Image (tube, coloured by chain):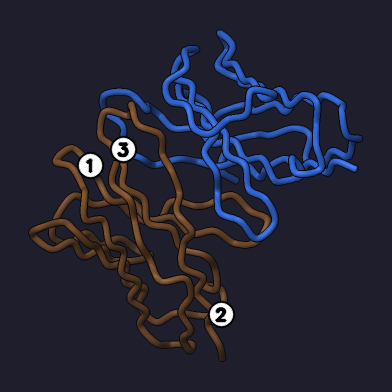
Chain colours: A blue, B brown
Amino acid sequence: DSGVTQTPKHLITATGQRVTLRCSPRSGDLSVYWYQQSLDQGLQFLIQYYNGEERAKGNILERFSAQQFPDLHSELNLSSLELGDSALYFCASSVSGGPANTGELFFGEGSRLTVL
Amino acid sequence: LAKTTQPISMDSYEGQEVNITCSHNNIATNDYITWYQQFPSQGPRFIIQGYKTKVTNEVASLFIPADRKSSTLSLPRVSLSDTAVYYCLVVEHTGRRALTFGSGTRLQVQP
């Protein structure tokens, strides 16, 4: 158990719909990262937040958005869903992600999104 | 941005030592080298991190030559449960650059 909690674990929805994935980082971790992993594909970095502020951005689609709240949990919003958005979405957290970044990320178990 | 290159796949047998090499020619002074392991449908798990020379923990060793343009993850005496994808990452120390995973190396351990 990494200490990172993601909900829901599974989600099935239809094209055009909107979903929200939630992530609670490990206690004390300030950074949250979101990754997308399609079937048999590598991990695609989406976005990172550090203490409530956007820190780094990957190839995140405009239909996707995220935020980190004052209690440090994060949400990833996916809208106008397409079939190709079906994937495992991982959240990870780290202690810093700031000036003392060590690169050690703790990953959650992921949210599996299926778009039909 | 330091791009990493790893073999796509490797095969081994139980009890053997496995060495996975990663190339990162454009590594910068502030960059660290980090390795992760991922099992199917699970999030990656941190294995080891180093800056130069050799780092060892209870799971693996990481060898980094003086020029730091490559690194080698060494797994001693692998077992079937080491079958996984292994990712090499170059991590920028200040944390202002995205932590991107490459394609990884798929290790298959056979009995």
What residue did someone put label 3 on?
A: A102
- Residue A109, position in %: x, y? 66, 45
Chain where mark 2 sits: B
Using a 10 Å C-alpha cutoff, classify the residue at mark 2 as few (fewer than 14 neighbours), some (14 to 19) or many (20 or more).
Answer: some
> With A20 as the anchor, is B108 left or right in this view?
left
What residue did someone put label 1 on?
A: B31
Can residue A112 be seen in the rendering of this structure? no
> Alpha carbon of mark 2 to alpha carbon of mark 3: how far?
30 Å
In the picture, residue A44 is in which quadrant?
top right
| Residue pictured at 74% horizontal, 40% vertical | A85
Which one is in front, B105 or A60?
A60
- Asked which secondary structure carries label 2, the reply is helix
Identify which amino acid the numbered label 3 is placed on: Thr
Closer to viewer: mark 1 or mark 2: 1
| Residue pictured at 56% horizontal, 80% vertical | B80
Tell me: residue A32, above or below residue B55. above
| Residue pictured at 22% horizontal, 42% vertical | B31
> With B32 as the anchor, is A70 left or right in this view?
right
Same chain check for tags 1 and 2? yes
Chain where mark 3 sits: A
In the picture, residue A21 is in which quadrant?
top right
- Asked which secondary structure carries label 3, the reply is loop
Identify which amino acid the numbered label 2 is placed on: Leu
What residue did someone put label 2 on?
A: B80
> With A95 as the anchor, is A62 left or right in this view?
right
Can residue A38 be seen in the rendering of this structure? yes
